[in-house]
Image: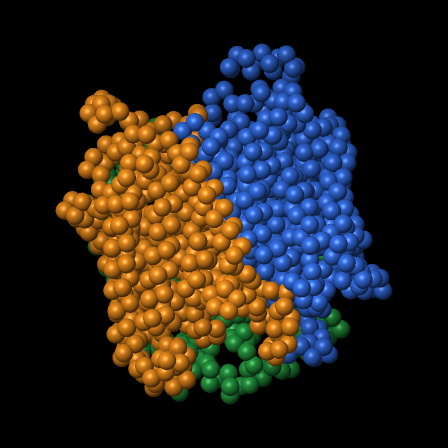
Chain colours: A orange, B green, C blue
Amino acid sequence: MGNCCDRAASFFGPQKNTNVRVGLPAVCFVWQIAMVVLFGVFIRYDEESDTHWVEFRRENNITSDIENDFYFRYPSFQDVHVMIFVGFGFLMTFLKRYSYGGVGFNFLIAAFGLQWALLMQGWFHSLNPETGKITIGVESLINADFCCAGSLIAFGALLGKVSPVQTLVVALFGVTLFAVEEYIILDLLHCRDAGGSMVIHCFGGYYGLAISWVLYRPNLHLSKRFHGAVYHSDLFAMIGTLYLWMYWPSFNSAITDHGDGQHRTAINTYLALASSVLTTVAISSMSKKGGKLDMVHIQNATLAGGVAMGTAAEFMIQPYGALIVGFCVGIISTFGYLFVTPFLEKYLKLQDTCGVHNLHAVPGMLGGFIGAITAAAATEAVYGAEGLRNTFDFEGEFENRTPGTQGGFQAAGTCVSIAFGLVGGVCVGFILRFPIWADPGDDNCFDDEVYWELPEDEEIVPP
Amino acid sequence: MGNCCDRAASFFGPQKNTNVRVGLPAVCFVWQIAMVVLFGVFIRYDEESDTHWVEFRRENNITSDIENDFYFRYPSFQDVHVMIFVGFGFLMTFLKRYSYGGVGFNFLIAAFGLQWALLMQGWFHSLNPETGKITIGVESLINADFCCAGSLIAFGALLGKVSPVQTLVVALFGVTLFAVEEYIILDLLHCRDAGGSMVIHCFGGYYGLAISWVLYRPNLHLSKRFHGAVYHSDLFAMIGTLYLWMYWPSFNSAITDHGDGQHRTAINTYLALASSVLTTVAISSMSKKGGKLDMVHIQNATLAGGVAMGTAAEFMIQPYGALIVGFCVGIISTFGYLFVTPFLEKYLKLQDTCGVHNLHAVPGMLGGFIGAITAAAATEAVYGAEGLRNTFDFEGEFENRTPGTQGGFQAAGTCVSIAFGLVGGVCVGFILRFPIWADPGDDNCFDDEVYWELPEDEEIVPP
Amino acid sequence: MGNCCDRAASFFGPQKNTNVRVGLPAVCFVWQIAMVVLFGVFIRYDEESDTHWVEFRRENNITSDIENDFYFRYPSFQDVHVMIFVGFGFLMTFLKRYSYGGVGFNFLIAAFGLQWALLMQGWFHSLNPETGKITIGVESLINADFCCAGSLIAFGALLGKVSPVQTLVVALFGVTLFAVEEYIILDLLHCRDAGGSMVIHCFGGYYGLAISWVLYRPNLHLSKRFHGAVYHSDLFAMIGTLYLWMYWPSFNSAITDHGDGQHRTAINTYLALASSVLTTVAISSMSKKGGKLDMVHIQNATLAGGVAMGTAAEFMIQPYGALIVGFCVGIISTFGYLFVTPFLEKYLKLQDTCGVHNLHAVPGMLGGFIGAITAAAATEAVYGAEGLRNTFDFEGEFENRTPGTQGGFQAAGTCVSIAFGLVGGVCVGFILRFPIWADPGDDNCFDDEVYWELPEDEEIVPP
């Protein structure tokens, strides 16, 4: 194998230049300075986080500080924050020699992206035309974390095959595209998508897949010595899995309506996730000799229930409805890992390191359509007149929209998110093909050695 | 050693059949479909998670959405959820080659059990006789997690010696027995047991021990090459320990009374846990040459204070009372690991992998009696007339119960939980002895190889 | 190398006595008994955690249980609790053979210190002169955790070079000094320091550095075989890093004013931390051949933004101000790891295992001065008259203090914390030099073997 690598290396010419000593600091500094300037121009505290809150309270007859949105949303925000950094981060540590890259670049992308997200989402959603300022509060922080999630999902498809500079480019365009599609879906189409089946998972999944398709590496097999887990790397990944799994009810309910909205969303998500676990275990066991379980399935497909409930969880889908959703997507997602990922790689030339196709793209798309069906099936008998209006926000210019119409728009929203993901991903993929990004060679993928100082005495996996 | 194993294997005949390829998927599918049907028939949202909440609010003059129970309990619920999946899960990763089984089967049992728990607890506690429906909210989710905890504790005693199908049987009966004993203890005897010293820990501990006793394996020494930790597996287990330790105040206070009840319970638990740490360290250090600390003690006995405060934490036990409880159970639990576990194995033929006897059974039983004493000692001088009534719920048919009587009932409740654990465990143990469950052979215990696809290049521990 | 060690050992005479079998249990028992007694004499529940809350509510016209401080602060408390035990604990697991000591002694120190902190802080801040009692609630628990943080930071400088008994001495004096300097800074000087840049980080950092300076080991190179990370130990440390990073907004906002105070503090801290990540990555990459990232920087300097915002985060520093602070301290902290730590070791004879100089001492000091400047720059135009009064607590005897004066006092407070750290640390250092503490020999540092029972079959790192 050593020989083969050497020969391959000489065949493909000298080693690729993976030096990021100029590029990475330059991007970080330029970007961070730009953020300081733009925040200086645009971003201020909103009325609930400003010292004038005490006056605002009095003017609006708010009886207690506990009515500040902070107390409605901060616990959920922290859960979401853990999902973004520990959940996504550790989920990507499963490779034997790319754990630093998994958790470290995830950290970098998210810290980079959330600042840009505050600006982008602010311009689209909360720019005050009079003052020219965006005001932020705890809900903005949650939305910024959500916005990063799209790019982190895309990173999952690219894991181990891109340079840190490329990940930042993915995040930069990812956040930008996200803000635009979110504006179209939530504001123009007036869809409901609290947990982001459409705007986060479906978009992020297809965005990553499209980039990965453009960046196809025919000789990736040269890195196959690094392409797998070891016993303890899979355990680290389970930390990520469990935090995503446990906190998903907070993810879906973080920005839903106060009161019953948050409450119901959490319950539905909790049930769908539990159901996914059982069907994932069943399919995983059926697929292997002796009924042995596969850690890849347990780490990923168990989460599909949360993804697929991202839109419908705030509706009256009923507890058994949530169980059915989890039941089906657990099966679909596990089948995806068994059959679709190998198929995509072989026939579509699409390398998807973490299988985001099966965990995000497809369950997210299904989640969008499940949301559409649930919305279309809503009736005043079940929701109550007031409840129906509150849940779907049938107010202002949308006052006369019916649940049936709403269902149609929800389905349209899902298509918008797929389109944005695919088209945006292909464009970004071509940008990333310029030979300036210091990405690793085909024989150097999935290896932390390239971008990290590794502990000296650690044994390197033999080639 | 290798030879010895081979000889042993030939002596005991052909290898046991550990194929779960039919059984495990069948159980999962049948079960999950049953859950969908039963949820469809029985389970609906309660008034705080239903879209009619807005009307409910108006009718009951509730001034703000923040009064929704979600905001009182959701942060505690998420902490409990982390304890169940990461806390219990990672605590059981300490074995060198059974970490997947520890965290993975824990995940499976809990996801399986919590659905059944919602039904069982619903039938006993919140079935509306008119509509025939159970309504659920965030408190139901907490209770379902609690209910699973009993079976997870039992799993701790069986860790490494049972098949995944058997763990599901343990959970099925465990949840059922739990719901019955909980109904007897909380409703019929009108005990208070917010953190579940009796209903969770004492029951779960004795349930697991009784099963393990029936499943005694005289030749377990054949697996001793796997029976121990490695450096990093003990670190993974510390993740579990710390999350259990940190969030135990939330565990005990999750379903106590709003206001001072939750507040006081959290304080008492926090103090008892801190006290346990110091006495555990002291005894652990005294017991070894050179005063070296033993990770088994640090991982487990430090938690005993939380278990033992499960009943009394909501009473006015006073901060110093909490410290005393932690002080004593830290010592008792560590002594248990040093002397009682070896004694049980040698003389009672009882193999207790995680030492649940010392962490759950005994501290839970003590916690029940500590609760009884604290209740019996309650006076109006300390609690105030109204406080006494609120704390012990002396209302309705229990209006005239005195603290002394309450103490007696609390003690009786503890005995009920022990009886349910022991008798139920023996019965379930006999069910698990049928030769149909694909459990591992005596030379194959504590080995993930049996039920998991392991990473190929990983070195197997030499026999 | 083996020979060299042997020769060194014979040169330095017989191996040091590291037996703690008498000392450690004795300290733990005596201490814990003292705590029980002192808690019995002094500590009671406050009016929000006592059963008389229901009467208190009625008397004070509090309309709902949700107004209990528990619901304002408990989620933040739990986040802080995680930072203390998992955050600090796992951050210190990065050494290849001192992970047990890192996470285990951290656990011991914190459990030991928080009890003493409740007493010390209680005597200074909430002793009721009439009853002679200290009353505690959830805010007391947060403050106790904060108080331990100072000693845990100091432990970071000493990691691997002290015995467990010595760590308890560090905590005993650390908590005592903390309570005094906190009283001077917060009460006498009337500074604001919600997140503790001054009272926690600056004090803790210099306290640890001063102790380490006194305990200088000229032959520490004899332990250099243990002084470094392995691949997975650095991943465990990333768990610590991420939990500290994610929950730092809760740390800084845990005890700020209800309403806008907590809200604004969380936003500012979130932004400063994100900004730190980018400049840390930039400097780390610039400093190494090929632009490779160094895990030490990523694990530590990314957190500097949270430290430096500990004082100013509750002021109206504006979002861009927070970004600028994070920008600068990310750079400063990374430079510290690159240049200052080696300089300190070489020229000042100061061995700082975790680099607390760069993560706590300097960013904490800067945070103090940033707070001073921000306070001095406060105007009624920005804060509103009422907001200014609330934010800086210009009430009672401080009614007429101006922001300018406040700024001066804030700066003075920073100096007080440095002085307490340095002087206190030197004194404690000399106490720790007595040859009675069973500390490890120079060739035995950074080795868990000395104080822990290690798994038998684990390969020991060859000398």
Residue A289 placed where, x, y %?
20, 46
Q: Is residue C97 visible?
A: yes
From the viewer's perspective, is residue B217 above or below residue A456?
A: below
Q: Residue at x 57, y 38 (%)?
A: C333
Q: Closer to the camera, C428 or B258?
A: C428
Q: Residue at x 76, y 49 (%)?
A: C408
Q: Residue at x 36, y 65 (%)?
A: A183
Residue B387 placed where, x, y %?
68, 75
A155 on left or right of B313? left
Q: Residue at x 31, y 26 (%)?
A: A462
Residue C288 placed where, x, y %?
46, 29
A439 on left or right of A458? left
Q: Closer to the camera, B368 or A59?
A: A59
From the viewer's perspective, is residue A69 above or below residue C377?
A: below
* View extreme (right): residue: C130
Q: Is residue C457 visible?
A: no
From the viewer's perspective, is residue A10 above or below residue A447?
A: above
A372 on left or right of A76? left
* View extreme (left): residue: A347
Write down the quadrant of residue B62 in the picture.
Answer: bottom right
